[in-house]
Image (cartoon, rainbow, N blue to C red):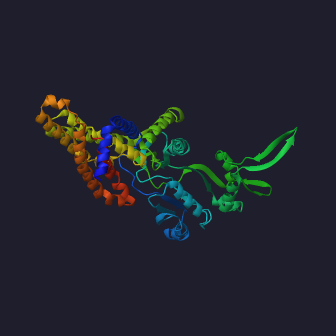
Amino acid sequence: MNKFVKSLVAFSLKNKFFTFFVTGLLVVVGTWSYLQTPLEAFPDVTNTQIILVTQWNGRSAEEMERFVSIPIEVAMNSVQKKSSVRSISMFGLSVIKIIFEDDVDDFFARQQVNNLLRNVNLPEGVTPDVQPPYGPTGEIFRYTLKSNRPSSELLVWQDWVIDRQLRTVPGVADVVSFGGARRVYEVSVNPDHLADFSLTPLDVYRALTAANKNVGGDVIEKNGQAFVVRGMGLFQNLEDIENVLISSRNGVPVLVKHVADVRIGTLPRVGQVGLDENDDMVEGIVVMRKGENPSRVLAALKEKILEINQKVLPSDVQMETFYDRDRLMTYCRETVLTNLTEGILFVTFIVFVFMLDWRSTVIVSVIIPLSLLFAFMCLRFMGMSANLLSMGAIDFGIIIDGAVVMVEGLFVLLAHKAHQVGMPQFNRLSKLGMIKKTGTELGKAVFFSKLIIITSLIPIFSFEKVEGKLFLHWPTLWVLPCWELSFLP
């Protein structure tokens, strides 16, 4: 080990230009990594998970568990690299959550789940819905629709225009709507009229179901051209529904309007959104895809919202921001940068007070930004994000303690030699040999002190799952600055 430290110090002293070149390269790559590293207010420490949501209207929780949840759970038990399968069964709703191991990516997990989901035997008309890949911290933006129009009309704009536009933004996993009355076409049958024509509500239902579709026909060839024959039957308005043929009596057609009233209504509401004085409005929540850079997603999202407000929506319907994660990230960025700047300045001042030499202080203090850039570079290459947890756990004392020992030792050596031989003779001396000898002796002590710190942090690197992702952000910033040994001389 002594030979290794001696060779490292000798190489650094002999190849000064190479050392400065590597340092400059570190500054460039570290700065690029800092600009490219995602900045989050709080990290997403959850494992990859797939959520299956299944709806079966009108069924009790016991039926949902027996006919939906249990069959899906049994099929998902054979998923590779899963850690647990959890389910919640409620009235008309089943939620299955498959949690995977640490090293499983979302693509592999979805492929496994979708392959096994095909073999699940579920009731007719019941189809599980695989939720988009987002985490518990994926909610990044909320907006409301401001207008004097009724909430039912605003919800139509939200579901059929805004939702589809926002999903085109890169990094957006899902757009969730809340509030508003959902518009539907209601056919209210009259029992007396049905009895007059000897019909039942089921007859009306079957007629409407059969009529609301397009059908294909044959091809007619004429004059060397082929004409495709189609039957257009999709409903376009209330009149189309009213004129649906149910049956005929004595050659007289019986239409829907003869036995029922057709009108526009709304589904029964189970919730309502209100803000300030408006107690009935529409709200949208934008969820970010897991692993994306929230700053980039928010920037693209705001551009899209500006385009929607100016070019897509009517002048009396506008999207207004209610919650923006960018504000929180800006506050966190300012807090972190303020703490880092104050920490660097304070440590630099303390070093100057004890050394009383500005050159030695600069040499020691420059280790701090270099270490931070190196840490950002490693965070970028490891796919980690910068957040309050990783940036707030930096210990400047551990970063510069080796530099302080090395620089102070060399400073004392040179000061004693100058006092011993006098400044004229000292200026003519070759100091490289003395620096190499003293640097080797001090470097060995500094190296082993860093090695002790790294060894004490090894148990933390054995953490797994949530605790591993939570704590592995900050030991990286403690262990990595040991690279400074090769640059100190």
Residue 35 relative to residue 240: left or right: left
Residue 479 relative to residue 190: left or right: left
> Is 300 in front, or is 487?
487
Number of numbered labels in the structure image: 0
From this viewpoint, which residue is outermost toward the top?
424
Name the residue located 18 percent from the left edge and 30 percent from the top edge. 427
Name the residue located 59 percent from the left edge and 61 percent from the top edge. 115
The answer to whether any part of residue 388 appears in the image is no
The answer to whether any part of residue 170 appears in the image is yes
Seen in the picture, residue 84 relative to 40 is either above or below; the reply is below
Residue 190 relative to residue 342: left or right: right
Quadrant location of the C terminus in the rendered image: top left
> Is 414 in front, or is 397?
414
Residue 435 percent location from the top left of the image: 23, 40
Residue 25 percent location from the top left of the image: 38, 37
Residue 282 percent location from the top left of the image: 46, 45
Name the residue located 77 percent from the left edge and 46 percent from the top edge. 230
Residue 322 percent location from the top left of the image: 39, 42
Quadrant of the rendered image containing residue 376:
top left
> Is 159 in front, or is 448?
448
